[in-house]
Image (tube, rainbow, N blue to C red):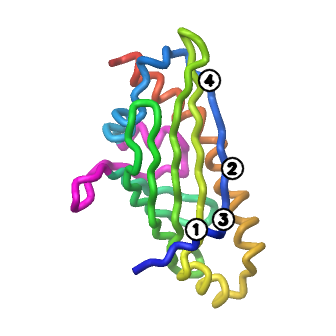
Amino acid sequence: MTTIRSDLILSQSAFSHIIDVPFEKVDIAKWLFTLPDAEYQRCAPPDHIAAGATFTDDGRRMSINVEMIGTGLVVQHYVGEITEASHCRMVSTSDVFTPNGRTKVQVIWDLSVKKIDDHRCEYTNGVVSHPTEEFLAFIREHGISWEKACADRQESSGDHNRRETPLFAESIARAARAA
């Protein structure tokens, strides 16, 4: 069993983007769980590699994403804790393949939208990473300090989120207009 260190934050970022779609037309959950692989790839080129939707053994919705974050290939196994039209909270124990080997981190992906006026809303894409005990042992084994691991992850994850947020927002807006 993987032990998550939720008391430690490896990285965190949140970015927002205004979309010209009425709040009532947006359905983040529908968008997320029907997102075509090619559209996912367009939302953060060249980092986004593949995406698909499935279910856990107990029937909860999942989003599987494969992406590069910095120098790590990350396989996200997001399980929906909240899957509503205006808010999805997805939690993954993610596999990270680095130049030094494989490890695991927890990633919490929080997607939300709030109404600005009758014609616009604001999408926010938040990402928080927590280390696992396995990750802490991994960085110790490779002589990487906690501070260095955090700085590297913050830089690469923050940059990735900054680039994908407006593209996700516009993809959600296109889906809302097509509905």
Please state which amino acid type lies under the numbered disc 4.
Answer: Ile
Q: Which mark is residue 164?
A: none
Q: Residue at x 46, y 47 (%)?
A: 89
- Can you say whether 82 is above or below 116 in the image? below
> Which residue is more in the foreground, 73 or 30?
30
Q: Position of 102 compared to 11: left or right? A: left
Residue at the extreme front: 7
Marks 3 and 1 sit apart, C-alpha to C-alpha, by 7 Å
Give the image location of residue 125, x and y in percent: 57, 41
Question: Can you identify the residue that label 1 sits on?
Answer: 6
Q: Which residues are magenta?
A: 37-61
Question: Can you identify the residue that label 3 sits on?
Answer: 9
Which of disc 2 and disc 4 is earlier in sequence? 4
Marks 3 and 2 sit apart, C-alpha to C-alpha, by 17 Å
Q: Can you tell which quarter of the image residue 25 is in?
A: top left
Please state which amino acid type lies under the numbered disc 1.
Answer: Ser
Please state which amino acid type lies under the numbered disc 3.
Answer: Ile
Nearer to us of marks 1 and 4 is 1
Question: Can you identify the residue that label 2 sits on?
Answer: 159
In the image, is residue 48 part of the stretch drawn in magenta? yes
Question: Can you identify the residue that label 4 sits on?
Answer: 18
Nearer to us of marks 2 and 1 is 1
Q: Residues within 10 Å of mark 4 (few under 14, many from 20)?
A: some
Nearer to us of marks 3 and 1 is 1
